[in-house]
Image: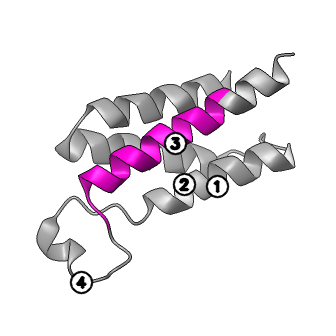
Amino acid sequence: MLLEKLKEILCKALLMSGNERVLHIKEFQNIVWDDSSIEEDELNDILTDIAYLLDFYEPNEIWRKQSPNYYGDEKLEDILKKAIEKIELYLGNTST
């Protein structure tokens, strides 16, 4: 299932660092933004909100200083944990 795959990608991003982390984030975003099979509005809102928030992750500390919207690893890890929880909650609500 697509949602399980997306959750797995976020889990990998949480466990990785550096370029590996960025690659998983980009993979998640590409799937969310390019997949027209996500028709359910609530799920689409959840996933696009997560993808949008991930846009502001900047691993390079110097570049991160260019905008107050950019954030680093600590905030990213919080966002990823909350995103995984949201997906798990959605999966739990739709499985009953």
- Residue at 53% over, 49% down: 30
Q: Earlier in the sequence, mark 4 or mark 1?
A: 1
- Identify residue for label 2: 51
Q: Are marks 1 and 2 in contact (CB under 8 Å)?
A: yes
Label drawn at residue 66: 4
Q: Are marks 3 and 4 in contact (CB under 8 Å)?
A: no
Q: Which quarter of the image is occupied by the C terminus?
A: top right
The span from disc 3 to disc 4 (Cα, nearest Å) is: 26 Å
Which secondary structure, mark 1?
helix
Magenta part of the chain? 71-88
Give residue 24's position: percent from left, percent from top: 38, 40
- Identify residue for label 3: 82
The span from disc 1 to disc 3 (Cα, nearest Å) is: 14 Å
- What is the magenta segment's predominant secondary structure? helix
Query: Quick check: can you spot residue 36?
Result: no
Of labels 3 and 2, the one closer to you: 3
Label drawn at residue 48: 1
Q: Is residue 86 magenta?
A: yes
Looking at the rendered structure, the kind of residue marked 1 is Thr
Looking at the rendered structure, the kind of residue marked 3 is Lys
